[in-house]
Amino acid sequence: MAQMYISLFLLAAMGCLMMGRVSAMNHIVGGSFGWIIPKNLSFYQEWAKPRTFGVGDKLVFLYRTGVHNVLQVNEKDFNACTQKEVIDMLYSGPTIMNLTEPGDYYYYCGVGTHCEAGQKLAITVTTAEGSSGTPFVLDTASANITSNGSTSTNTTNIKSSANSVHKIGVVSGLLSFFLSLLI
Ligand SMILES: [Cu+2]
């Protein structure tokens, strides 16, 4: 019986781990372009538009140390490219930002006039599962959802069978208790 409990627990734990792995995502800012002075002002907003940034995801800014940097600022500083209330400054590339809380986040490059030239990114982090939003990855995402579905059904099955095992345990426990009273 104990062995059965342990193996059921391990199966459920494995299911949880697998689901956890699917949900976290690394977003390479600017894709293959990386963190650069873009060709047009809206480049990074266009890159971010189809994406979902989920809690637990990472933002990866790819750049060479000294050429660019990453400043995390508030909305005001972001819009004006000013540095009045800088939240975080990161100078050594690549910079990896862990998205741990839902909310709005603002980043720009503090080198020269790179911010004015459009090297800036505003994102909203949600509790939803992160996605890159491109058709190719959407296919993978839907495949993940299916595998998630089967994983969760498996987990439910495990849970319900664990429950029935537990019930049998309780019933037999009660029976033996009453039997011991009789004896
Ligand atoms: Cu720059």
Image (cartoon, rainbow, N blue to C red):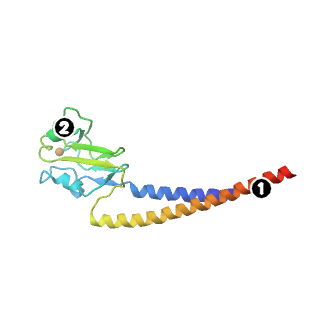
Q: Which residue is mark 2?
A: 76
Q: Which residue corresponds to the image point at 19% horizontal and 37% vertical from the top-left? A: 76
**Ligand 1 located in image quadrant:** top left
Q: Amino acid at mark 2?
A: Lys
**Residue 170 as seen in the image, left or right of residue 55:** right
- Label 1, secondary structure: give it: helix
Counting from the top left corner in percent of width and height, residue 23 is at 39, 56
In the depicted view, which residue is nearer to us: 150 or 170?
170
In the depicted view, which residue is nearer to us: 95 or 4?
4
Counting from the top left corner in percent of width and height, residue 139 is at 33, 67
Q: Residue furthest right?
A: 183
In the depicted view, which residue is nearer to us: 88 or 52?
52
**Residue 37 as seen in the image, left or right of residue 18:** left
Q: Which mark is residue 49?
A: none
In this rendering, which labeled residue sits more in front, label 2 or label 1? 1
Counting from the top left corner in percent of width and height, residue 88 is at 27, 37
- Label 2, secondary structure: give it: helix
- Quick one: label 2, few (<14), some, or many (20+) residues within 10 Å? few
Q: How far apart in space, not on screen, are marks 2 and 1 (Cα)?
A: 70 Å
Q: Which residue is mark 1?
A: 175
Between discs 2 and 1, the one toward the N terminus:
2
